[in-house]
Amino acid sequence: MDFNMKKLASDAGIFFTRAVQFTEEKFGQAEKTELDAHFENLLARADSTKNWTERILRQTEVLLQPSPSARVEEFLYEKLDRKVPSRVTNGELLAQYMAEAAGELGPSTPYGKTLLKVSEAEKRLGAAERDFIHTASLSFLTPLRNFLEGDWRTISKERRLLQNRRLDLDACKARLKKAKAAEAKATTVPDFQETRPRNYILSASASALWNDEVDKAEQELRVAQTEFDRQAEVTRLLLEGISSTHVNHLRCLHEFVKSQTTYYAQCYRHMLELQKQLGRCGWTQASEAPYLPDPISRHLRGYHRACLPTPEQHLTYHHCGHHACGTYWDWLGPSRRGSSLPGRGSSPSQWDSKGPGALRLRGG
């Protein structure tokens, strides 16, 4: 118990000395040992590496998992050393909804059949996304996280220790400087005509005491300088290891790009196959729905649906030949444009029998 109290008192004294030295440095009342330019560059490079690694790590996590609540949940599972439960991707959830909609709306209808085909494609996209997230997490996120939680913590610990060693060294320098100043003042030869012999004896005794104090301060300074140099070398080696960290992160970045390229290539193949499947189905073509450019659709709003042109027809004006609408469409045939025109009251089926062409107004 007595040993612990002595150690506690010694530690408290060291902490107080460092605090005083640090405060005096901030107010410009004490000298500070400066590190060499190369060492300062290593420190700045390490800080930049740490800051940008944190930013890249956080943004990559957002890319792989956009949901903040899901990221917090995964973080808690990792801190508790528990396995993160499997999570359904957005593509897989969309595929599930489409399949359920097709079953309820009718899987034999054109819309239901399309929903099923798209559902299968979305399911494959979701599986590809899951593989990409797993691969990117292992090959890219894990090395970055290991650097921040491993190497950087070691570097930070050694830097704090170096800072303490520097404060101790500067405190020893300040103590030695004060001791030498006091010794010089005490060794000044007094004037015997103005000073009593008793005071002269006390002055000589004080000079001897300050001489011992100077010797003690010099010894403490040598020890502090040795510890500072040793710690500076250890910290320098760790900071120079940042170059190896950059090489490792570069390799991980290549792996991330490779996994991302594979993922998007799979997505492209799946969607291209889906597009081909939909193109082979005649009922997937939207020829039944009329195509109306915006300026014309505003004028045709409210007219008979059967009078609207098909997507193959080029509309140049907003009149039709239906009796209910009371306007005229002029038909431009494929062979002789303007020569074969359906008359007033003709039906859209008569227009379609002429083949694809264009409509042109002819006085209504």
Image (spheres, grey):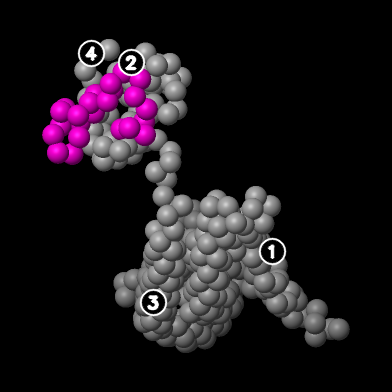
> Which residue is denoted by mark 4 in the rendering?
363
State the CA–CA distance, disc 2 to disc 1: 65 Å
Residue situated in front as seen by the camera: 244 or 343: 343
- Look at discs 3 and 4 and give the one toward the viewer: 4
Q: Mark 1 or mark 4, which is nearer the start of the sequence?
A: 1
Tell me the magenta residue range: 329-351
Q: Label 3, secondary structure: give it.
A: helix
Q: Quadrant of the N terminus?
A: bottom right
Q: Work out whether 84 lies above or below 283.
A: below
Q: Amino acid at mark 2?
A: Thr
**Magenta stretch holds residue 350:** yes
> Which residue is denoted by mark 3 in the rendering?
258
Q: Is residue 147 visible?
A: no
Q: Label 2, secondary structure: give it.
A: loop
State the CA–CA distance, disc 2 to disc 4: 9 Å
Q: Amino acid at mark 1?
A: Glu
State the CA–CA distance, disc 4 to disc 1: 70 Å
